[in-house]
Amino acid sequence: MTDKVKVIISNDQKDVKIPTGMRMLVRRCCTAVLSLENFQGSAEVSVRFVNDEQIHQLNKQYRNVDQSTDVLSFPLGENNEYDINKDTGAKMLGDIVISIEHAVEQADRYDHSLQREVGFLTVHSMLHLLGYDHEQGGIEQVRMREKEETVLTQLGLKRDNSYYMDE
């Protein structure tokens, strides 16, 4: 069982007001993923809220993709090996960067709450920090999607049927 999860949340944008309870939701999402994955020991995660312009710059700088996106994950570990915070002994999993502007737009597009969208993005990124990858599609993508839905359902953020956009 996970010992202690420290989630460091910063809001580095002024375009969107972060609703009350959003930080608690992000913490609950991080903890729920670690619990689902039977993560051993203490963990530390950083979550930053940014705007589209900021995430565009990060996406360009680190992934060579010249556009904004909804979320970026910067894992610090590889194959379950993590840097350890010398002061706390916690495993440092990495950084999650969420474009709150993008999240608002997607919540609107998919007709669900901003909480559901930020919850999804947080859970999705946490799985990336733990080594999951969906870039190749196939079974990994399916496994990742199943885990996302399991956690979101546990947290009361179950997807409704209007999630998929009509083509």
Image (cartoon, rainbow, N blue to C red):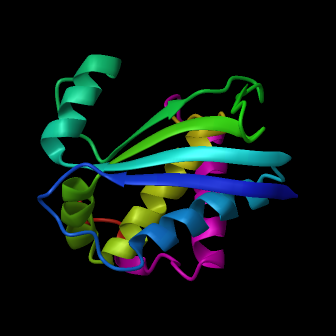
Q: Quadrant of the C terminus?
A: bottom left
Residue located 25% across and 57% down the image: 100
What is the quadrant of residue 60 in the picture? top left
Using the image, determine if residue 150 lies above or below residue 75: below
Using the image, determine if residue 159 lies above or below residue 52: below
Q: Is residue 156 magenta?
A: yes
Q: Is residue 18 magenta?
A: no
- What segment carries the magenta color? 135-162
Q: Position of residue 134 (x, y in %)?
A: 54, 37
Q: Position of residue 26 (x, y in %)?
A: 49, 64
Lateral position of residue 155 relative to residue 48, left or right: right
Residue 141 appearing in the image: no
Residue 35 appearing in the image: yes
Q: Position of residue 78 (x, y in %)?
A: 69, 23
Viewer-nearest residue: 90 or 111: 90
What is the quadrant of residue 117 in the picture? bottom left
Residue located 77% across and 25% down the image: 81
Main SS of the magenta segment?
helix
Number of labels in the image equals 0
Q: Quadrant of the N terminus?
A: bottom right
Lateral position of residue 111 relative to residue 142, left or right: left
